[in-house]
Amino acid sequence: MSFEQDTRVARCGEDGLYRGTLRRNWQLLGPSGGYLAAMALRASGRAASIRRPAGFYCHFLRPASFDEIDFEVAVLHSGERSESMRVSAVQKGRPILEALVRMAAEADGLEHHEVTPPEVPAPESLPTIDELLRPEHPRVPFWENIEGRVLKAERFADGRPAWDPHWVEWYRFRPEATFDDPFVDAGRVVVLIDTLSWHAAWLRHPDFKYVGPSLDVAVFFHRQASHSPWLLAEQRSPIADGGLIGGQGMIFDRDGQLVASGGGQLFSLPLTMIASMHPESWPW
């Protein structure tokens, strides 16, 4: 199934109520936080009059399970230039996520583009994650949905040193890479910015004694990217301290134009704690 199919939400009775199903093929520790957030963004799109997402921010309240999930969308403001909505996700009567979404209409205004993308080879010239994974490496369901092209193949080596927490990689969703619905297509960015903060931190700490479940994620959408199957993700983790991990990310299209920026914070939890909390969903 495609990202569009896996994030579908259907109207459920009253206005503002939608229901979807969290699919097991988006498993990391449990359902991916970015995947859940993308579904919340899509639910807001079902209620939006302005078809251009501009900003998304959410708190993850507790882990979700692979089951049906309900989204309640409340319109906080609706004007000619912008809309604001709150999205509450509930599963089996338990709050899972709270999000705020801003939509903004296209208009004339100031223009400047003062950001330079990383200088990297074209994705077609780079090896895939699938090619570099050795047989003993775990196959995480989440990454079956996204093709990654790797700039630093040495990260797959055992006993590698600690590196700067700066992650750069190309990604393309599969089997479909782009989507006509702007809220579905923007979900690609939400998934990447949420997921890759941990990857940047992991570069600095290769011993893998901790994992980083997301506490929140914020994304600012600067332009649509439905023209660009490949997205270049640049993610940094400038600080990990006191049980928290900070992440900052930018997403560029194939032409080097900035598509979105954002970040979030993660818990820093011992691997043994997570394994004992979620034995049924632990992919390793």
Image (tube, rainbow, N blue to C red):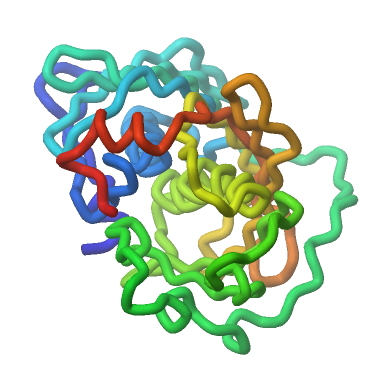
**Image height of 31 relative to 11, above or below:** below
- The location of residue 211, given as percent across then percent down, is 46, 39
Q: In which image quadrant can residue 44 be found?
A: top left
The answer, for residue 104, to whether it is visible in the render is no
- The location of residue 166, given as percent across then percent down, is 72, 53
**Image height of 98 relative to 4, above or below:** above
Residue at 49% x, 38% y is: 210
Q: Farthest front residue?
A: 159
Q: Depth check: give the residue in front, 32 or 279.
A: 279
Residue at 39% x, 49% y is: 184
- The location of residue 56, given as percent across then percent down, is 53, 30
The N terminus sits in image quarter: bottom left
Q: Is residue 238 left or right of residue 155?
A: right
Residue at 32% x, 72% y is: 175
- The location of residue 236, given as percent across then percent down, is 70, 46
**Image height of 84 relative to 196, above or below:** above
Q: In which image quadrant can residue 123 be found?
A: bottom right
Q: Depth check: give the residue in front, 141 or 22.
A: 141
Residue at 76% x, 53% y is: 164
Q: Is residue 53 left or right of residue 200?
A: left
**Image height of 3 relative to 172, above or below:** above
Q: In which image quadrant can residue 276 be found?
A: top left
The C terminus sits in image quarter: bottom left
Mark count: 0
The answer, for residue 128, to whether it is visible in the render is yes
Q: Is residue 143 left or right of residue 19?
A: right
